Amino acid sequence: MVHHEDGGMSESVLILEPAQVELYRIQLDHIIEKRHQARGGKP
């Protein structure tokens, strides 16, 4: 479901190619690591 700023919702489908999934995984890993470091965790 896509939640709109006006409170409405609509159903949607997200289609990703394998390369896009890999790119998002890398980006999420990077974001998670930066958050962990910001909270004082060891790299």
Image: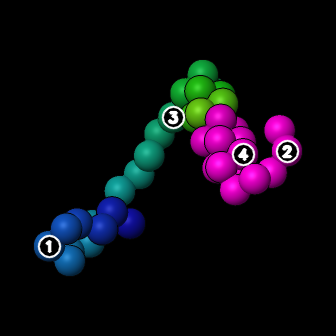
**Identity of the residue drawn at 70% across and 56% down:** 39
Query: Looking at this rendering, what residue extends furthest in the left direction?
Result: 6
Which residue position holds label 1? 6
Query: Residue 43, relative to residue 4: is it above or below?
Result: above
Question: Residue lying farthest front?
Answer: 40
Mark 2 Cα-neighbour bin, 10 Å: few <14, some 14–19, many ≥20: few
Front-lying residue, 31 or 15: 31
- Is residue 23 in view from this perspective? yes
The residue indicated by pointer 2 is: 42
Residue at left offset 33%, top offset 63%: 2
Residue 25 spot, x, y in % from top left: 65, 36
Q: Nearer the viewer, mark 2 or mark 1?
A: 2
Q: Amino acid at mark 2?
A: Lys
Which quadrant would residue 34 be assigned to in this image?
Answer: top right
Question: Quick one: which residue is furthest to the right in this view?
Answer: 42
Q: Nearer the viewer, mark 3 or mark 4?
A: 4
Res 32 seen here: no
| Disc with the residue nearer the chain's start (1 vs 4) | 1
Tell me the element at label 1: loop
Quarter of the rendering containing residue 8:
bottom left
